[in-house]
Amino acid sequence: MMLKIIATILFYFGYGSYYILLRPRFVDLGASYFQILLIDSLPAFVALTSVFWGRLADVISRRLFLLLSSLGGIFVLLLGFSNRIYTLLFFLLLLSIFASIAIPVINSMFSYSEDTEGAFALYLLAEALGWTLSGSIMGYFSKDTGLFKLGYIISGIAWVIGIIVFYQIYTDNLNFGSPSTSLFKVHFERGLIFLAVGTFFLEFGIVTSYGVLSVKLYEVLGKSKFLYGIVWASIPAFLSALVSKFYGEVVKKLTPWRSLVLLSAAYFVNIAILALAKGYLMAFFWILPLWNFMYIALYSAVTRLSRENERATAFGFLNSTLNFAVFLSALSGILADKFGRLSSVVLGLVSILVSLVIFTKLNANVSEAVWDID
């Protein structure tokens, strides 16, 4: 487990380092809200293939596809050497291919534990530590152009090393797929489809709202990339690491379904406050750790609703759902450019309300929608 944690920290350090400061960089380059939201939506369009990569990994070899995903480190490095908006977006598109290959397989590695919630709590703790380091280091490096580029080089190397460690420790007895398994014959429980619909509306609301509110945060912090890196990523990620184990216990006690109801309500309230808050009060509510609570609940739900030999496929399906929501969120950028960012926030809040209704329905019908997989 320790090697898994180290590999996760390295991978998400590489992931977080290129992602965290892209919005401030785009703001400095004079990007529109639409272009800023493309940072999420264009890579997400490519990541819609996640379910396909997860299925291929289940059928052919999860270890092989892990090794292939290490190539993403090259494009992490390249992102540090361009200041043109559309060149940066092009590198993001290429990078997202390898991220969509890696993440379903990495998720599946942590799902084969008797204590699923505890395993995912450790995974998200390690992910949070990776983001904490990346936010702090890249925020500090942003003060110097040479150091900033060096940071991207280090991040690309960290991505590659993290993936290689995963490759080395992924044991063969967890690779249930075989070439004889049908690529297109997949068994998805009805509850998993229902979960995906709720997840879509929740993620769309989150990305739509936080995407435009991140610009407000950058302005509140005096357009300091160092402070932005600390507040946007490092502090919330550090706090997430502290509460990950607690969240794991909460999800185990409440069940993933009740946890998602609670989480949707919490996001609705938090986003409403962020939209109205001024000054450093906004920064305070920004750092509240909610994202790992959501992912522990989602990962636990997917594990309960999928078969072992289709686990990477199921996680790929979840990742594709999340990325479909992110891709469509770019439309709210057009809305913000035309009517102001508050319009996008309202759209996001409405979407989260829809997810709250869906998760409430799922919880109420859990005996019909959810069952143990043989």
Image: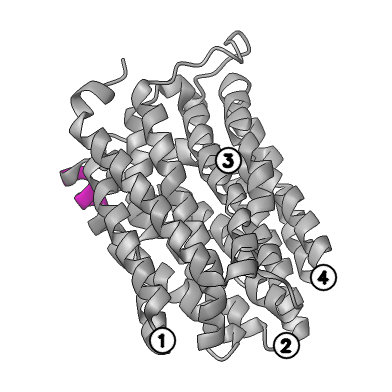
Tell whether label 4 touches label 2 (CB within 8 Å): no
- In this picture, residue 330 sits left or right of residue 341: right
Looking at the image, the residue that sits furthest to the left is 253
Q: Earlier in the sequence, mark 4 or mark 1?
A: 4
Q: CA distance from mark 2 to mark 4?
A: 14 Å
Q: Earlier in the sequence, mark 3 or mark 2?
A: 2
Residue kind at label 3, given as amino acid type: Gln
Q: Which residue is mark 2?
A: 144
Query: 10 Å neighbourhood of mark 2: few (<14), some, or many (≥20)?
Result: few
Label disc, if present, on residue 168 of the rendered structure: 3
Q: Is residue 340 above or below residue 126?
A: below
Q: Which residue is mark 4?
A: 81
Tell whether label 1 touches label 4 (CB within 8 Å): no
Q: CA distance from mark 3 to mark 2?
A: 36 Å
Secondary structure category for the residue under label 2: loop
Mark 1 or 2: the one toward you: 1
Q: Which residue is painted at 46% across and 20% down in the image?
A: 309
Secondary structure category for the residue under label 4: helix
Query: 10 Å neighbourhood of mark 4: few (<14), some, or many (≥20)?
Result: some
